[in-house]
Amino acid sequence: MALNGSPAPSAARPFPAGALRLRRIDVWALRVAIQRPVETSFGIMRDRPAVFLRVEGADGAFGFGEIWCNFPSCGAEHRVRMAVDELAPLLSGRDLASPAETYALMWEKTRVRVLQTGEPGPYSQAIAGIDMALWDLAARAAGRPLRHFIADDAVDSVPAYASGIHIGIAADVVPEFRAAGFRNFKVKVGFDTARDIAGIKALKATLKPGERLFSDANQAWDLETALEFAQGARDLGLDWLEEPLRADAPAGDWARLAAEGGVPLAAGENFMGVEDFDAAVAAGSLAYIQPDMAKWGGVTGCLPVARAILAGGRTYCPHYLGGGIGLLASANLLAAVGGPGLLEVDANPNPLRSDIPGMTMTDGRIVLGTAPGLGIEVLPETLLPQVTLHQTWAA
């Protein structure tokens, strides 16, 4: 997949107080046990990790971000060390004009390292998390919520859907999530085609008027199996079928599935680089395109991509399955960009998500707070016992 670290002009907002010189970066890996494992077609998540980070300038300005690490969970501590040992020193002693300039600098300085290590994903994720934190810092310095720092006409709430629901337990947990305020639900499939379709049919019959149902196969199938599922489910009212094929499957396979399957297609969480998203928009096979800003791009990369998705007649739906800081940033970006997209919320119990302030669920919508930036002042004390590794870089 292509990697592109060049920010578009639309994302090149300067730091409000002028050039920023970093003096400290703190990065934490956290991990919580869960009672109900999250099962996907490619593996099982038996605990929930997160990597949170805080950047601080010489003038005391600060911001928070999150680095993707949800699978495999052993990657969390690796991402901490990558951010502190690999990326932070590259920014030392530099006057940084904007988050976008810093994003481009990190990519330029790590291109050879990416090739040397064969680790484009971890570098993408760590760069995205630092970028997220720098945008939080900039918005905080401007005294505006992140969404309004990005776009004056940003909205203050976004529609959401409950994610992370295994089709085998959906009948039991969807009522729980409905009671928590969700009105839209996404189930994980890709286990057994006949049982998956039967489960969707049964669940669809229980939905209330106006509720929507999505499905996610997590790259489980080849083309023929994906067609079998899509054609079997085409009359059940699924709003989309997510990642039925591998992210790197031939464009012709995606086109045939879109033409013959009968269910709108979604993908994008495993794309990395502007070229991947441009190609997806141009191909026209995907109705919903789903960048994950903690996995690739941060705000700098995903802002122009999201706008291009909407300009291309597709729906921008941010992918997210991690802790609360990245979720909050994803919600702010969606609120700034607009369009009919929904925010993905892993509704399974996870204090690394739910203990982060700044969002409330009301009748199917996430209502965002009014504090500057992302609105996070410190990591909640309730999460500190979950820290497995904390490292600091200081200028």
Image (tube, rainbow, N blue to C red):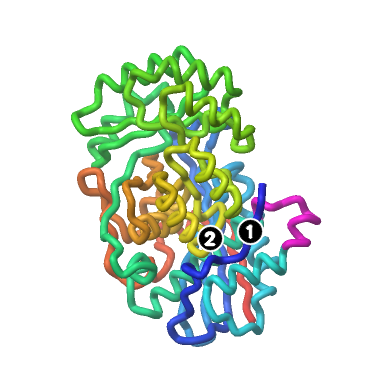
Q: Residues within 10 Å of mark 1 (few under 14, many from 20)?
A: some
Q: In the image as oriented, which residue stretches furthest toward the right?
A: 116
Quadrant in which the C terminus is drawn: bottom right
Residue 19, position in %: x, y? 53, 85
Comparing 335 with 58, the one in front is 335
Res 363 quadrant in image: top left
Residue 373, position in %: x, y? 38, 70
**In the image, is 31 to the left or to the right of 344?**
right
Judged by its main secondary structure, the magenta piece is helix
Q: Please, what secondary structure does the residue beneath circle 2 have?
A: helix
Residue 388, position in %: x, y? 57, 55
Comparing 327 with 106, the one in front is 106
Instruction: Kindly identify the residue that appears in the image at 47 percent across and 37 percent down.
Output: 286
Instruction: Kindly identify the residue that appears in the image at 33 percent across and 58 percent down.
Output: 335
Q: Residues within 10 Å of mark 2 (few under 14, many from 20)?
A: many
Q: Name the residue carrying label 1.
A: 4
| 180 w.r.t. 170: above or below | below
- The kind of residue tagged 2 is Gly
Q: Please, what secondary structure does the residue beneath circle 1 have?
A: loop
**Disc 2 and disc 1 in contact, CB within 8 angstroms:** yes
| 99 w.r.t. 155: above or below | below
- The kind of residue tagged 1 is Asn
Residue 57 visible = yes
Residue 48, position in %: x, y? 50, 44
Is residue 118 found inside the magenta-colored segment of the image?
Answer: yes
- Looking at the rendering, the stretch of residues picked out in magenta corresponds to 111-122
**In the image, is 255 to the left or to the right of 358?**
right
Q: Name the residue carrying label 2.
A: 301
Is residue 289 found inside the magenta-colored segment of the image?
Answer: no
Label located before the other in sequence (2 or 1)? 1
Work out how far the residue at label 2 is from the one at label 1, CA to CA, in angstroms: 9 Å
